[in-house]
Image (tube, helix red, strand yellow):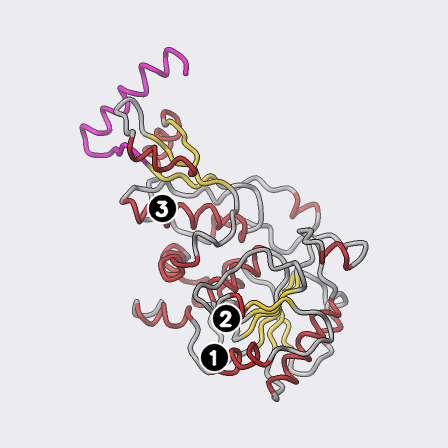
Amino acid sequence: MSPAHRFVAPAAHAVLRSIGAGSDVYGYPQMVRAGLGHMMGAWARCVVWSRKNGVPMLAPQWRQLRIGPYLRRERDKRAYHKLFRSEGYVGGALRLLCLAIGRRVDEDHAGDALQRRTSAAPTLVVFYEDRGFDTLRDDHALLLHELLRITRPEYVRAAFVDRPFIGVHVRRGDFTRPPSDADLRAGRRNQQTPIEWYAAAVSALRRGLGAEHPVRLFSDGTEAELAPVLRLPGVEFVAPRTAITDILSLSQARVLVASGSGFSQWAGFLGQMPSVWFPSQKHHRLRGGADGANWELEWERDASMPQAFLGAVASGWLAPSPLRNAVTRVGGR
């Protein structure tokens, strides 16, 4: 720390506290340039920690400079700052001042930050990158409510689906095609799952459930790439909308046939529905409770679906989704 900073930081912090605008500790979700699913990880952990410790949280910086989506000619240019509101978070000049003078501490040392508060400068507990759902599973209701609170209402309204469906998410875009399925089974990330696997999973689910349930297909792929699934009867290709609308819409599926992406993981976490994954592509457990792992099936193509899994799908087919329940509790959007 420079001599000038050692003088300015305490003075600025003292002024803030004297007018009741400052805090000793803030939560700070440091966002990375990634897809929305991975960006939401830092936001979610910061929300949970800040709420449980009564600490104000700096507004997430959803706006990031992105060139890749333009170079790859993706339909979604990932302008995530247009999707969310910052009300309820520390923003504006106070946020900038905290970032300028604050002492940064990694989330792994958050306990020390709370115990060793200092008047010299505010402490920013930094939450960075995606760490999965191990620390989030028990706070599903909190995070769903908070996500609905900050998402602009028009993107929530556009997400609702009127009837139960099998949800399928096929990730293409910046995911690469693996040399063989062995790469996927080894757990390599950001790899395209074969489209034939999705078609087989849909057919196996329908056979096991004894009904040709409707399918909604979410993907950034082309119709030619998705043809094996689109050729199945009763499949609707959902034209891509904003990322948050599609995540919320997919979260209403009664069973999810997932890719290995953060998008699928967040849809599965928010929806808490049974889900089907290519072997070794379910990178995180999403559902809490004793039966959670049994609802997340890593499935080999052409194998039969376990009866216990099919029973879980059937028993929840007509139940309202967590999204619908959450919106109903707060009086609609």
Q: Quadrant of residue 238?
A: bottom right
Q: Secondary structure at mark 3?
A: helix
Compute the Cα span from label 1 to label 2.
Answer: 8 Å
Q: Secondary structure at mark 1?
A: loop
Q: Amino acid at mark 2?
A: Met
Which residue is labeled 1 in the image? 316
Q: Which residues are magenta?
A: 1-25
Image quadrant holding the C terminus, namely bottom left
How far across and down, in percent of the image, does residue 106 sit? 44, 34
Single out the residue that lies furthest toward the front: 290
Q: Secondary structure at mark 2?
A: loop
Which residue is labeled 2 in the image? 273
Q: Quadrant of residue 117?
A: top left
Above or below, comparing residue 166 to residue 36 in the picture: below
Mark 1 vs mark 2: which is more N-terminal?
2
- Whether pointer 1 and pointer 2 mark residues with C-beta atoms closer than 8 Å, the reply is yes
Residue at the (68%, 54%) spot, across then down = 173
Above or below, comparing residue 47 to residue 94 in the picture: below
Mark 3 vs mark 1: which is more N-terminal?
3
Which residue is labeled 3 in the image? 49
